[in-house]
Amino acid sequence: MPMRASVVVLCASLLINWTNGFSYEGYKLYEIVANDIIEMKYLRELEKQAGLNFLKEAYSLGEPNEVVVAPQYQKEIEKILKSIGLKYKIVVENVEEIMEAERRTFSLRPFMGLGDVTFRSFMFHHEVSMNAYLRRLAGQYPEITKLEHFGTSFEGRDMLLIRVSSGPSSNPDVPKPTIFIDAGIHAREWIAPPAALYIIHQLVENPANAALYQNVDWAIIPCLNPDGYQYTQDEERWWRKTRSVLPNSDCRGTDGNRNFDYYWMHAGASSTPCAETYAGPQAFSEPETVALKDWFFTNNGTVKLYLTFHSFGNLLLYPWGYDRIVPDDVGDLKYLGDLVAEAIYNANKLNSVYMVDTSALGLYEAAGTSADWAKAVGGSALSYTIELPLGSARYAFLNLASEILPIVQETWAGIEVFHSFIEERFWTNLTITTTTPSS
Ligand code: 0X9
Ligand code: ZN
């Protein structure tokens, strides 16, 4: 079919690396609308390929997809869209102009001392920013915090995890449950690391929250993809993947959230190295995902709740994501998710309304995700992917610095609910059972 052939030719020509002093000069942002199932299918066909960067996917017919396209492919894309009959409009003629504004805001940072944290601007990952904050906390609060070297990223960045705990369980029969939280596996989702940092900040630096780490331990890594994160600050703001170098391609990076070995490549993942959802040459090809796996195996069976922060879409998603099926404990997962969503709304900050569902049913099928792996293989009883809100930002992933604080504050309200559930289910109930005389 001529149309399909041209899609293939286009896609082949898109398999080119865009990097090296990257600029979005001349890139255009398109809104593309599929109005029937056939149009939607063609669009999904295009989406699987590299080069077209789908920033926002429509979940229903008639809803716009937001796609950014490099100058050299725009004519061809428009030709294809017209031949399929897909309606589109150009919403940004030159993406570089948005990015210049973004960079200006990013460079207007408040003065910060070494080891400070802020929720008024986005932080760097490196030693004078997030890592410095974690090190400062560990130095200042040695009774309740412990820093762990979680791993080293592909480019050699030190990935730090912080534990918050009041100490080991005094009852050897009942170890304390751990809540494990990560953020930033997708580089461009800048609102995710602050959500994790705010939880750390509230636990460690707000004495009013001391009860939250009495019976429950916390393990939090605020930046799971530091190479990608740095790259979004220096070069390509909308970069998603890791930055690993691939043996047989000029394109770089793997989607960390397709790289876990539970139903790896089963659905919603690509084997094309340049694609946004490239699952990697094999499962656990990335040092960042291996680090997470190793941590879970080293801390065998202690994690009862796994949370991974992403953006955007106001979604609380639980397994399974690899297929449109529900796990045995769907009742608990949905019940708790709804409670958390209610608390977030009632926090009265942005009044975000979250939808609660399985990952595959509520969003799309995608296999090899950390949340599926954490439940199925990592042994975490409960597991959620949290797609944070975009707030009033106009462009995908470009959360406003002024909305970091309300977003992380309302998210914290949800975290308190998660904590109560875990404490009751995996501590209070178990300790009562084990300390009650049997006769
Ligand atoms: O596609 C992803 O990895 C997540 N969305 S994002 O826009 N942050 O990239 C969603 C993962 C949820 N899991 C599944 N849908 N299986
Ligand atoms: Zn994500």
Image (tube, grey):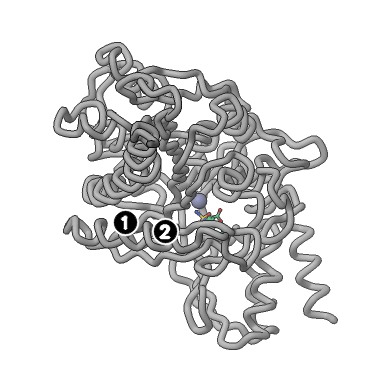
Q: Which of the two discs, 1 and 2, sits closer to the camera?
A: 1
Task: Note whether residue 288 is visible.
Answer: yes
Residue located at (23% from left, 47% from top): 409
Residue at 46%, 23% in the rendered image: 160
Q: Position of residue 85 (x, y in %)?
A: 64, 86
Q: Secondary structure at mark 1?
A: helix
Residue found 43% across the figure and 22% down from its top: 172
Q: Secondary structure at mark 2?
A: strand
Nearer to us in this view, 306 or 60:
306
Q: Which residue is mark 1?
A: 340
What residue sits 46% from the left and 65% below the top? 357
Q: Which residue is mark 2?
A: 316
> For residue 113, what is the image quadrant?
top left
How far is the residue under mark 1 from the one under mark 2? 9 Å
Q: Residues within 10 Å of mark 2 (few under 14, many from 20)?
A: many
Using the image, tell me which numbered label, if any, was put on residue 231.
none
Question: Tag count in the figure?
Answer: 2
Sequence order check, earlier mark of 1 and 2: 2
Instruction: Check disc 2 and give the amino acid type.
Output: Leu
Residue extending furthest toward the front: 439
From what the image shows, is residue 150 above or below residue 395? above
Marks 2 and 1: in contact by CB < 8 Å? Answer: yes
Where residue 340 sits, quadrant-wise, is bottom left
* Left or right placement of residue 263 versus residue 237 in this view: right
Q: Nearer the viewer, residue 97 or 420?
A: 420
Quadrant for the C terminus, please.
Answer: top left
Judging depth in this view, the residue of 212 and 101 nearest the camera is: 212
97, above or below 122, in the image: below
Residue 180: image x %, image y %? 44, 36
Q: Looking at the picture, which amino acid does disc 1 mark?
A: Val
Near mark 1 (Cα within 10 A), the count class, few <14, some 14-19 or many ≥20, is: many
In the rendered image, the quadrant that contains the N terminus is bottom right
